[in-house]
Image (cartoon, rainbow, N blue to C red):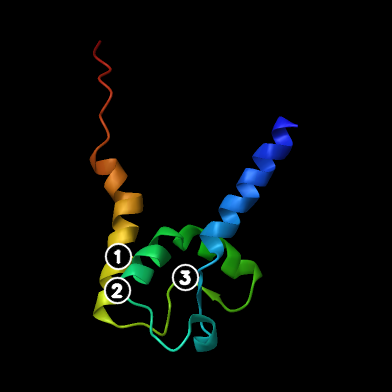
Amino acid sequence: MKKLWMLLIIIVTISLFTSCLATGDILLIGEKPAGFLLGIWHGWIAPFALILSLFIDGVRIYAPYNTGWWYDAGFYIAIISGFGGISLFRRKDKKDK
């Protein structure tokens, strides 16, 4: 029973993460181009989008219909803080002890 709940939680979490994936279709995101906040979101879910783009046509890591510089800034802030920023704050283990 515990495994069933864990599987359900994983499925719901993945569904929530991938519900706002970047697509090449303007109709799916509406009339407005993707802005700063969607850039941050797309940066955070980029690993999921990369995996899904291998299996599903139309899924993109980066929204082609965006506001330009602001979307790029949000996307790169999320990529850097999500993947590279963690290693900047890790403590090095001292093996001399």
Whether tag 2 and tag 1 are in contact, CB under 8 A, the answer is yes
Residue that numbered label 3 is attached to:
61
The answer to whether 42 is drawn above or below residue 2 in the figure is below
The amino acid sitting under disc 2 is Asp
Which residue occupies the foreground of this view, 72 or 33?
A: 33
Residue 57 sits in quarter: bottom right
Q: Residue at x 30, y 65 (%)?
A: 76
Q: Residue at x 52, y 58 (%)?
A: 17
Residue that numbered label 1 is attached to:
76
Local packing at callout 2 (Cα closer than 10 Å; few below 14, some 14-19, many 20+) is many
Residue 41 sits in quarter: bottom left
Q: Secondary structure at mark 3?
A: loop
Please state the horizontal and vertical placement of residue 80, each as a whole percent of the image.
Answer: 29, 56
Local packing at callout 1 (Cα closer than 10 Å; few below 14, some 14-19, many 20+) is some
Please state the horizontal and vertical placement of residue 72, each as a whole percent of the image.
Answer: 29, 73
The answer to whether 7 is drawn above or below residue 20 in the figure is above
The amino acid sitting under disc 1 is Tyr
First of labels 1, 3 by sequence position: 3
Q: Residue at x 49, y 81 (%)?
A: 29
Name the disc covering residue 72, or none: 2
Q: State which quarter of the image contains the N terminus.
A: top right
Which residue in the rendered view is the most extreme toward the top? 97
Whether tag 3 and tag 2 are in contact, CB under 8 A, the answer is no
The amino acid sitting under disc 3 is Ile
Q: Secondary structure at mark 2?
A: helix
First of labels 3, 2 by sequence position: 3
Local packing at callout 3 (Cα closer than 10 Å; few below 14, some 14-19, many 20+) is many
Q: CA distance from mark 3 to mark 2?
A: 12 Å
